[in-house]
Amino acid sequence: GRHAPGEHVRVFPISNWTELDVWQYIERESIELPEIYFAHEREVFNRNGMWLTAGHWGGPKEHEATETRLVRYRTVGDMSCTGAVDSDATTLDAVITEIAASRLTE
């Protein structure tokens, strides 16, 4: 876009990064992460093909059975609306390998 002399321009290059780019950056910079970013056994239920966390905020409904599965959340923030993926990725290298092989978008 155009801007007038003296105006500031804000650029957000990370907006163009893929999920794999972010994880490779974390590896390259040796950034430590809390365990929540890796796979854990969780009580989940399946709704419309997605694994959701059992809890008071949205499920399961009467017909939705829960089960304990080894899953990982690709987006960390709000478990009430974020689906989990089956995963055994408990290390940074395993997450990168998993994402590189995945054909599912976040």
Image (cartoon, helix red, strand yellow):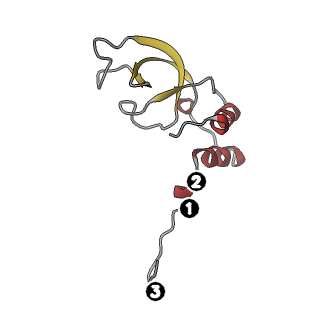
Q: How many marks?
A: 3
Asked if marks 3 and 1 touch (Cβ < 8 Å), the reply is no
The residue indicated by pointer 1 is 13
Asked if marks 2 and 1 touch (Cβ < 8 Å), the reply is yes
- Amino acid marked by disc 1: Pro
Q: Which sits in the foreground, 36 or 74? A: 74
From the image, state whether disc 3 or disc 1 is nearer to you. 1
Q: Residue 7: where, in percent of width, then height? A: 44, 82
From the image, state whether disc 2 or disc 3 is nearer to you. 2
The residue indicated by pointer 2 is 17
Q: Residue 27: where, in percent of width, then height? A: 69, 43
Classed neighbour count for the residue bearing mark 1: other residues with Cα under 10 Å, few (<14), some (14–19), many (≥20): few
* Image height of 56 relative to 99, above or below: above
Q: Is residue 5 left or right of residue 54?
A: right
Q: Which sits in the foreground, 8 or 48? A: 48
The residue indicated by pointer 3 is 6
Real-space Cα distance between discs 2 and 3? 29 Å
Tell me the residue at 55%/21% (across/down): 40
Classed neighbour count for the residue bearing mark 3: other residues with Cα under 10 Å, few (<14), some (14–19), many (≥20): few
Of the two numbered discs 2 and 3 on the same chain, state the one appearing first in sequence: 3
Q: Is residue 87 left or right of residue 53?
A: right
Real-space Cα distance between discs 2 and 1? 7 Å
- Amino acid marked by disc 2: Trp
Numbered disc 2: secondary structure: loop
